[in-house]
Image: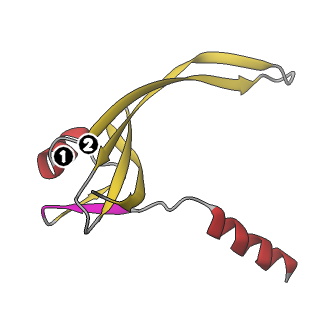
């Protein structure tokens, strides 16, 4: 019973992740290209690019740096009657879709 309660609390505390969003009657999913997203959703309200270092542990347990991972976040504001969405792209493909609060 304790395990179920812990699992339930972990699920409730995690951020909401949407599996897809709808733009102009077309479903946008993880794996879709930036071009497809822009074709159906238009230009994003906000776009940001990030570079984060890639770190890993070698066979001796020492932390090593292996370059940088680049990703781009696009935020879409669909207005006050719909939730905003943040799409994360890596290598030109959607890797994550987050549902944000209501738009403005």
Specify the quadrant of the image occupied by residue 12: bottom right
CB contact under 8 Å: marks 2 and 1: yes
Give above or below for 63 relative to 15: above
| Residue 18 percent across, percent down from the top left | 42, 62
Which segment did they paint magenta?
20-24
Is 31 or 96 nearer to us in this picture?
96
Q: Is residue 21 magenta?
A: yes
Q: Main secondary structure of the magenta part?
A: strand
Give above or below for 38 relative to 78: above
Give above or below for 27 relative to 36: below
Q: Describe the element under mark 1 as helix, strand or loop.
A: helix
Q: Residues within 10 Å of mark 1 (few under 14, many from 20)?
A: few
Query: What is the residue that sits farthest to the front in this orientation?
Result: 104
Q: CA distance from mark 2 to mark 1?
A: 5 Å
Quarter of the picture holding the N terminus: bottom right
Circle 2 is placed at which residue position? Answer: 33
| Residue 41 percent across, percent down from the top left | 17, 51
| Residue 67 percent across, percent down from the top left | 56, 16
Q: How many numbered callouts?
A: 2
The residue under the point 86% across, 78% down is 2
The residue under the point 14% across, 52% down is 40
Q: Residues within 10 Å of mark 2 (few under 14, many from 20)?
A: some
Circle 1 is placed at which residue position? Answer: 36
The residue under the point 26% across, 52% down is 77
Q: Describe the element under mark 2 as helix, strand or loop.
A: loop
Question: What's the mark number on residue 48?
Answer: none
The residue under the point 34% across, 48% down is 31
């Amino acid at each position: 019973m304790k395990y179920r309660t812990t699992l339930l609390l972990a699920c409730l505390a995690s951020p909401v992740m949407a599996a897809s969003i709808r733009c102009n009657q077309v479903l946008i999913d993880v794996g879709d290209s930036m071009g497809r997203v822009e074709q159906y959703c238009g230009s994003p309200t906000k776009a940001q690019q990030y570079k984060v270092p890639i770190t890993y542990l070698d066979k001796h347990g020492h932390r090593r740096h292996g370059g940088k991972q680049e990703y781009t976040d696009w935020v879409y504001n669909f207005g006050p009657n719909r939730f905003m969405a943040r799409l994360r792209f890596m290598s030109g493909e959607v890797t994550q879709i987050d549902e944000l609060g209501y738009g403005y």
